[in-house]
Image (tube, rainbow, N blue to C red):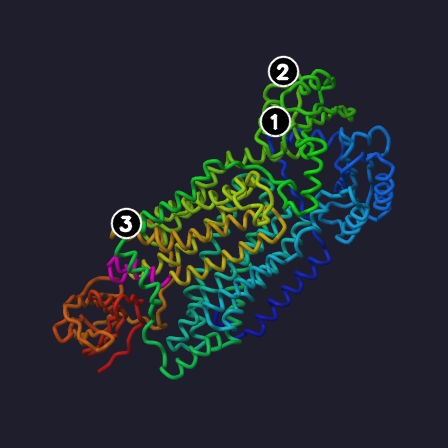
Amino acid sequence: MARWCYRHRLLVLLLWVVALIGAGVGASAGGTAYANVFSLPDTDSKSAFDLMEKAFPKAAGDTDTVVWKVDGGSVRDASVRARIEPALEKIGRMPGVGAVSSPYAGARGATQISADGTIAYAQLTFTERANEVPKQLVQDVVDTARAAERGGLRVELGGQAINRIQGPPTGLSELVGLAAAALVLFLAFGSLFAMLLPIAVAVFGVGIGLFSTQLISHVTDVPDIAPLLASLIGLGVGIDYALFIVTRHRRGLLRGLEPEESAAVALNTSGRAVLFAGGTVCIALAGMLVTNLRFLDGVVIGTSLTVVLSVLAAVTLLPALLGFLGPRVLSRRQRRRLAAEGPARQERASSLAARWSATVQRRPAWIAALALVVMVLLALPVLSLRLGATDQGNDDASTTTRRAYDLLAEGFGPGFNGPLQVVSADGDTTALVKDIAGTRGVARVVPLPPAHGVTVIQVVPTTSPQSEQTDRLIDTLRDEVIPGAGTRAHVGGVTAVSKDFASVTGDRLPYFVVTIVGLGFLLLLVAFRSLLVPLTAAVMNLVAAAASFGVLVAIYQWGWGLELLGLGKEGPIQAFLPVIMLSLLFGLSMDYQVFLVSRMHEEWVHTRDNARAVRVGLAETSRVINSAALIMVCVFLAFVLSGNQGAAMAGVGLAAAVALDAFVLRTALVPAAMHLFGRANWWLPAWLERRLPHLAVEPAEEPEEAHVPRPGPASVVHGFIRTEEGEPVHGASVTLLSKGGRQLDRVTSLADGSYIVAVPGPGTYLLAATASPHGSRAHHVVVADGPLAHDVELTEEEVDAVKQPSPPRP
């Protein structure tokens, strides 16, 4: 497939462009129909909601609020009414505004004025739902209301429609994330063209994914946070997956492969790993369905679709783009060096990565202990995790929605922004109303006239919707007050729904965690034929999750630096966030674990030397893993600018999770633990080995013709072991192994650095040489019908990869 896409690159590019434009036109014509459905089966709030729908059919339009306050006098003063009433009348005449309830209209309106007469509010109802109200109409409402302000008279507005226009421009967070990712890619590649490739892949994958999600919202319930989360994860994985493939392609070019051959090899190796990684992310996302939370169904659809399209773009569009660029995917410096010096015979890890890898090998216990202490300290705040829902009281203090929320709380009590609804169909509720009014924590009780045999009692708590005391009041009403009154009734309302949602999520979270951790264990067990490697990965995933939630609790629940950073006001952690974050963290950490351990496993198979396998694997993969993680962190943190509290919280949490996973766990704790475990890392019972299927996550990069030993006369490989300066290395250990990792011969170099090992017959073998402090070197050699002369150069503290077969020499 990679070759076909490479050779038909113009057709492939046109197909993707047509798909993007077509999806965009369809989404633009269809509009959006996002719906936040929090109803939960078999919960008290769902029963209340069903009765409410029967008595009072749900209004189609969104209801928002205009709030004003006077610094002196009363809102009833003629001078205040002379400014406010014309503004409300003008708003009421606007096309798209259905009704405006004024506090100056009769006895019922008088309840919209605070007891001290300094604060009042009016409710305005649009004819459409919040996400369908034209932004220009909302802006006209805001401008008209704010025009009534004067010295000593403040006017603020709150509601979902108002919230749409006070945030940053649509797409700002995505653009900032892309810009940050582009900078990291340019520093990593040193080439403008190479930098643009992952960006292009992400733009096509995420763009089509978002347009498709918008279209799907017309046929199923998709919450408005779904496209934000889809773009957040889609940009991250799309850029990262393309980064892995482009890195492998550039490596092939530097080895002298033709651009087409290099692209095919890159897709056959890293492309397979991308398919595996994308599949694990989608499986993890689908794991959210086991929670049976309807709100998450749309999130699963949107994010999974975007991930699938990002993977598809990486394995089809990317090779086509590589075909357009040819060798220009390398930097100018690399192209000049390739032309002057020819293909690189060696592929060396960076000196910094090699030094760090050697340090981990020398001091694994200290590094493991230090990394573990850091993770435990960061995880401690998770012990006070409280799930709930955020509202406009958590917005930044500079926003009009937050100021309107605070004014309503000041004038009518903290519980006014989240009233409870006690719904009963039993008829007489006089005793129930009296008992509720006498309950501690209740500020006001307002029974509404019965409709269709259903009575609704509005209950305003004395505490805010996010307060733990409000949660306890809901429990008291359900468990004591309602049963004590001898009436069948249910407690509903937004606050009660949020509490039930958090409770159900918390109850089902352990089953979800067991499901995705167990799935990860099985996948890694099959991939690496080891018990300890997947067990270590499972533990590390849990540690990373605990630490990232600890960071979230400290910032968003405890409020550390929240107002300073302009992230709003502290409150509970969004109830849906643990499930979403754990799904994404599982998929992303699997990417890094597979990328890291697959290289270690390859080295282990060839050398059966655990210390070398861990050292080489870490040295060669840490730079790419850290670059990929840095891109993820930049993309995720950019969503703080989205204006959506849920998306911002998810961005901060995922950025912390990825940073800790890549920079602490995969770079320090995992390799240190593997050094401590030694050969036990790769142990698997023989009976289990025979029963497990074989899964090649990323097959070795081999020439198309496999070099296998064939019957023939025995021969030798001989040569000299020298330093970079040409000095002979005495006492170097030289080992010859079969391609399967079986040791065939082992010798020690002489004083002049010479060595000679016996070869059973023609074929491809692995020759490994190591000597302290000169480092190690290993690569494949191809032996023909006669002796092969092969010299080895060792460099102090350098770790290199297993090399491609060296051409036979006479």
Q: Which residue is mark 2?
A: 484
What percent of the width, then of the height, locates residue 142?
Answer: 77, 48
Disc 3, SS? helix
Q: Earlier in the sequence, mark 2 or mark 1?
A: 1
Nearer to us of marks 3 and 1 is 3
Q: Which residue is mark 1?
A: 474
State the extent of the magenta-drawn residues as a range: 604-621
**Quadrant in which residue 469 is drawn:** top right
Residue 493 vs residue 261, the one in the foreground: 493
Q: Is residue 408 magenta?
A: no
The amino acid marked with disc number 2 is Gly
Disc 1, SS? helix
The amino acid marked with disc number 3 is Ala
Question: Could you classify mark 3 by the number of other residues whose Cα lies within 10 Å: few (under 14), some (14-19), or many (20 or more)?
Answer: some
What percent of the width, then of the height, locates residue 347?
Answer: 34, 71
Residue furthest to the bottom in view is: 340
Nearer to us of marks 2 and 1 is 1
* Residue at 34% across, 59% down: 618
Disc 2, SS? helix
**Quadrant in which residue 453 is drawn:** top right
Q: Which residue is mark 3?
A: 365
What percent of the width, then of the height, locates residue 351?
Answer: 33, 67
Residue 689 vs residue 658, the one in the foreground: 658
**729 on left or right of 245:** left
